[in-house]
Amino acid sequence: YQATGKRNLLDIATKSAKHINKVFFEGDPNYNGGKPVNQATGHEEIEIALVKLYRVTGDPLYLNMAKKFIDIRGVTYVPDGKGTMSPEYAQQHAPVRKQDKAVGHAVRAVYLYSGMSDVGTLTGDTTLSPALDKIWGNIVDTRMHITGGLGAIHGIEGFGPEYDLPNKEAYNETCAAVGNVFFNHRMFLLEKDAKYMDVAEVSLLNNVLAGVNLEGNKFFYVNPLASDGTVDRSYWFGTACCPTNLARLIPQISGLMYAHTDNEIYCSFYTGSKVDFALTSGKVALEQKTNYPFDESIILTVNPEKNDQTFSIKMRIPTWVGSLFVPGKLYRYVDNNSKAWELYINDKKIGNLSFKKGEVSLDKGFVSISRKWKKGDKVELKLPMPVRFSHAINEVKADNDRVAISRGPLVYCAEGIDNTEDVNRYYLTKVSTDAKVQRDDTGILKGIDLIKNVSADYIDVKGNVHQASLNLIPYYAWNNRGVSTMNIWFAENEKKVRESVAILPVAIKDIKATYTNEGENVFSIVDGKHPKNSKDTEINRWTSWNKKGEKQSIDFTFEKPTDIKAFSVYWYDDNGGVRLPDVWNLEYKDDRGSWKPFPLYSTDSYSLLKDQFNLVHSDGDSFVVESIRLNLTPKADSAVGVLQVRFDIK
């Protein structure tokens, strides 16, 4: 309706909303025995929709409905179950005004908080603010990834325990990041504080944009902060909320860039744009020129309707300019590379002394310029963008002894395509002063600023340490040039890397599997760790989950022709989706490159025993090969898994 002025779909929406009001709050003889349902929805979003309908139509019915749905949550119905039927899952564990922490399904949660912020803003209901402030603080202090991602835990797609922020295993649904933008923008409208737009910006430019590739035709549902090279975007999902949510958010960005009161203009997002305002003092046309988030300069040209028109322009000074990348207690810079921002009015630099004169002031993260404006006045804000390094607080165990790299509002990551293959094998023992920013001028990354030559060390698959330099791209731009490894949080010492990656036995050159479950690594099956039993989940493993009934193979290539005396495999079996194979066997590659059956010793067989190594010997005094293949045929209703493999070499 807003785009076309046509009411046909709007009329359907209002009719539907009135029907919902009758069924839920008045009573309809066709539903629930004529009694009002009077129960909040399981997946919060109708509250946001009703507020939008109110804004467009001006009919208070829809705003009142949104408030009612919020008021009855956790009051008229509290589920009594586990998992998706737990009270916390859909934030029904307590009345909203008594909630103080982010819990449950992350997307549902931030939609609820967005609706609460809307209702608080439009009704003047201040009783919602204490809960919103506590919840927001709980998110940024304990439950948000540095990318602005929310809902780190698989299974419930939601918030886990405080400080539980894994990297490779992170969930961080794209929809949750979209909701994080919605929630923080609405909190900004409610409280006029720039910190909310700082969080919205980090979530938008990192997690949200990572949810779609640069061509705009492939999507992430889940957004991890590290990958072993098995993660790739999909063209579509059976549950298609993430692609459509991106399609909903991106056109709204222009509406998030500015806000205004009767005599104040807030610049909340920076990007090239033109906009008109109707203030009490008269109309104002504003043009913004910038290549933010890559360039530090933002230039506003101000054209009031008449000269000497008095109003205020407020420009956001992002948190990342100071000592923190993003608001909250979770992350802090560890380098000394901060530089002061600068403000110019009509090419004249405004120093701090001028702030005391009243024309320029700082308030809630905005630099406010209050003056009599003339046509053509220019304001330039310079936000320095050096390369910065951040630590997480100690409570975030996943990031202990690790460092993340950012520039401006962008989190950067390394991909295998720009570095030695596995970027999870790099570690940084010091903050690099050699890093250079270079704009890519070719290919899919054209126009994007890259970080080059970060001093680092690298441990290869044999455990050898090499001096290296690390090249990084913005996190949002990863997985656009094929599938490769990726990492954001880099180890700060050699020990940390050795704890987290597999080091191959001296004889093995490479291992390749036909398929590896996301979050697992086939190299882990030769790291020498002895399983407690076939259900052992404390050590890394390889599985083909969820490729039920599909044949798999694992190829082992040796550094040189190797005399194999015996081979043994320790199966992983969880008594569920991953079971012992139906059958298995070995092959070897001959001199012509053909695969031939392994020469099994006459009394041996391919055994299928749990909680122990299944051993076979080669037949004969000498069996010299360069490659061995493990073939696995799963049962029809399950996948297969391996905890360890061992070679007995002469």
Image (tube, helix red, strand yellow):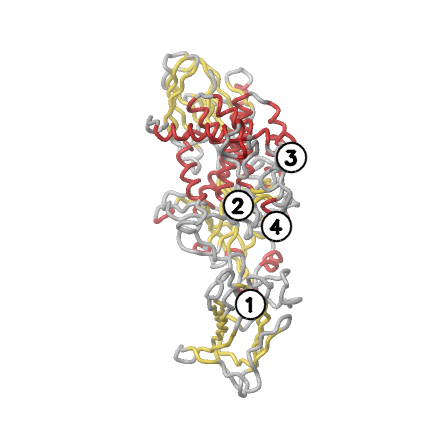
Inter-mark Cα distance, 3 to 4? 31 Å
| Amino acid type at image mark 2 | Asn
Residue at the disc numbered 4: 398
Mark 1 lies on residue: 504
CA separation in Å, label 2 and label 3: 25 Å
Q: Nearer the viewer, mark 2 or mark 3?
A: 3
Q: Residues within 10 Å of mark 2 (few under 14, many from 20)?
A: many
Q: Reading the chain from its start, which is encountered first: label 3 or label 1?
A: 3
Looking at the rendered structure, the secondary structure element under dot 1 is loop
Label 2 SS:
loop
- Front one among 95 and 555: 95
Q: What is the CA distance from the residue labelled 1 to the residue labelled 4?
A: 24 Å
Q: Which numbered mark, 3 or 4, is in the foreground of this view?
A: 3
Location of the C terminus (image quadrant): bottom right
**Separation of residues labelled 2 and 1 (CA atoms):** 32 Å
Mark before the other along the chain sequence, 3 or 4: 3
Looking at the picture, how far across and down is residue 437, in whole percent?
A: 44, 44
- Quarter location, residue 530: bottom right
Say which element carries label 3. loop
Image quarter of the N terminus: top left
Q: Earlier in the sequence, mark 2 or mark 3?
A: 3
Three-letter residue code for mark 3? Ala
Between the residue at mark 2 and the residue at mark 4, the CA separation in whole angstroms equals 15 Å
Q: Badge 4: few (under 14), some or many (20 or more) residues near its Cα, within 10 Å?
A: some
- The residue that disc 3 covers is 94
- Measure how far apart labels 3 and 1 are at the Cα level: 52 Å
**Amino acid under disc 4:** Ala
